[in-house]
Amino acid sequence: MPFTPLTQLPDRPVTRFAPAPTGYLHLGHVVNAVFVWGIARARHGTVLLRIEDHDRKRCQLEYEMALLEDLDWLGLEPDAGTSAELRAGPSPHRQRDRESLYLEALARLERSQQVYACDCSRKGIAFDGGDVPNEETRYGGRCRGRGLSRAAGRGLRVVIDDGDERFVDAALGAQTQIPARQCGDLLVRDRLGRWTYQFAVTVDDLEQGVNLVIRGRDLLASTGRQIWLARMLGRAAPPVFLHHPLIVKPGGEKLSKASHDTGIRELRAAGMTPGQVLGRAAFLAGIVAAERPLSVEALGDPFRE
Ligand code: GLU
């Protein structure tokens, strides 16, 4: 049962594996890795590793080191941003070492769109009310016309136009999203001075030449705004996006970083080999029809046309 994309994937794609070091690696990450490395290998592409530690409060060095160790154990070696490079010190493959790029991108964004300071708290925004109940909170634009200065303790938002974004997801087909209705003016930097996920990931994908984004379906709703933002930053053509299924526990519960039954360290301690872990992830994600060991060398096989 080979995986057949619905849309043309780039030849020799540049793709990325972009975990946040907020916990230990679990099978959900390995599912993503199997798609990323598998598709890249099948199409003679490149895999970049990117440590997404924009959220300094939740990210920990211990988790970053554990993540590199687990990837090494699994045999998943990126073509750029190798564990040796990341262990050696500052690297363009780690978000906290990319501050100057984000500042440059912010300056560029300000040339095309209005950026303004915002002192709303998350709670205040929830109070403003959104039109996408149960999904995410839409910012109602309270600070848009207030002309607040950029002082410490204030976030930065960009005015988002009220248009729709259409794209073809390589696994899900045609999609239409209206970012202005989903999230309202986009937060670029939060009140504690941290770049947001949406901003950092869009800048990184642009600057690192990523033309194929492979990630779980939980991030599908973010795609329209990332395509919009990339255009505002001067990106000519957006990357191709592929949102793959997420694996859940037998009871339908989402895997979490605290899941002891799916943590890579636990599976390893229980005696599983790297090939068995990769094979289990590929099976649970529906990439292969039966659970059997899958070697790193064979990761591209299910994705060859
Ligand atoms: N860092 C995100 C995560 O850990 C992935 C971001 C992305 O693929 O766009 O889920």
Image (spheres, helix red, strand yellow):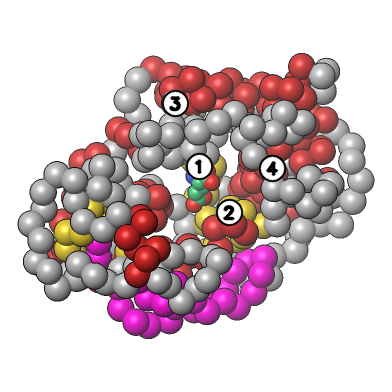
Q: Is residue 229 visible?
A: no
In space, the residues marked 1 and 4 are separated at their CA atoms by 17 Å
**In terms of sequence position, does the residue under pointer 2 or pointer 4 come before the other?**
2
Answer above or below: position of 76 versus 128: above
User: Residue 215: percent from the left, percent from the top?
Assistant: 58, 53
161 sits left or right of 239 in the view = left
Which circle, 3 or 1, is nearer the viewer?
3
Picture residue at 76% right of the left edge, 16% below the top:
269
For disc 4, the marked residue is 255
Picture residue at 28% right of the left edge, 49% below the top:
190
Q: Which residues are magenta?
A: 157-184
For disc 1, the marked residue is 18
11 sits left or right of 109 in the view = right
Is ligand 1 within 8 Å of the beta carbon of the residue shown at mark 1?
yes
Q: Amino acid at mark 3?
A: Gln
**In terms of sequence position, does the residue under pointer 1 or pointer 4 come before the other?**
1
